[in-house]
Image (tube, rainbow, N blue to C red):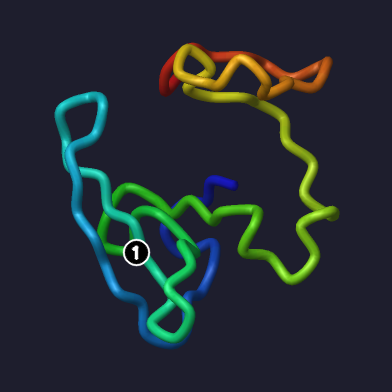
Amino acid sequence: MGFEPGQIKVTGEARRHHSPAANGNTAVRNFCTVCGSMVFGGGHDLDGVNVYAGSLDDPARFEPRIAIFTRDRAHWAVIPDGLKVFETMP
């Protein structure tokens, strides 16, 4: 779930990991310091924040509107009908 900087407030400590992104930039992943789960990507000091729906208390409330990086999806990963589909990052 993508948010502009300032649309959400991240509290608590996160451990950052930097890795090469598909577009040649650096991807930033933020992990919970307690359990090690990926919680969000990016940061307030970057272009925006992507919260991973699986990190929500109730992920069933998340309703996707787009599917990205479908070029690299596993053959068994089903894309729900009605989504805008992008092979890479739009």
Label 1 neighbour load within 10 Å: few <14, some 14-19, many 20+: some
- Vertical order, 33 against 21 (above or below): below
Which residue is situated farthest in the front direction here? 76
Picture coordinates of residue 2, whole percent (x, y): 53, 46
Residue 42 located left or right of residue 80:
left
Residue nearer the viewer, 67 or 72: 72
Picture coordinates of residue 45, whole percent (x, y): 26, 62
Picture coordinates of residue 33, whole percent (x, y): 38, 82
Residue nearer the viewer, 44 or 19: 19
Residue 29 located left or right of residue 60:
left
State the residue at coordinates (42%, 58%). 5
Residue nearer the viewer, 25 or 6: 25
Rendering quarter of residue 27: top left
State the residue at coordinates (84%, 55%). 61
Picture coordinates of residue 67, whole percent (x, y): 61, 24
| SS at badge 1 | loop
Residue highlighted by disc 1? 44
State the residue at coordinates (36%, 77%). 14
Question: Of the residues shown, which amino acid type is indicated by label 1?
Answer: His
Badge count: 1
- Vertical order, 51 against 70 (above or below): below
Residue 54 located left or right of residue 58:
left
> Which quadrant holds the C terminus?
top left
State the residue at coordinates (47%, 22%). 69
Residue 25 located left or right of residue 66:
left
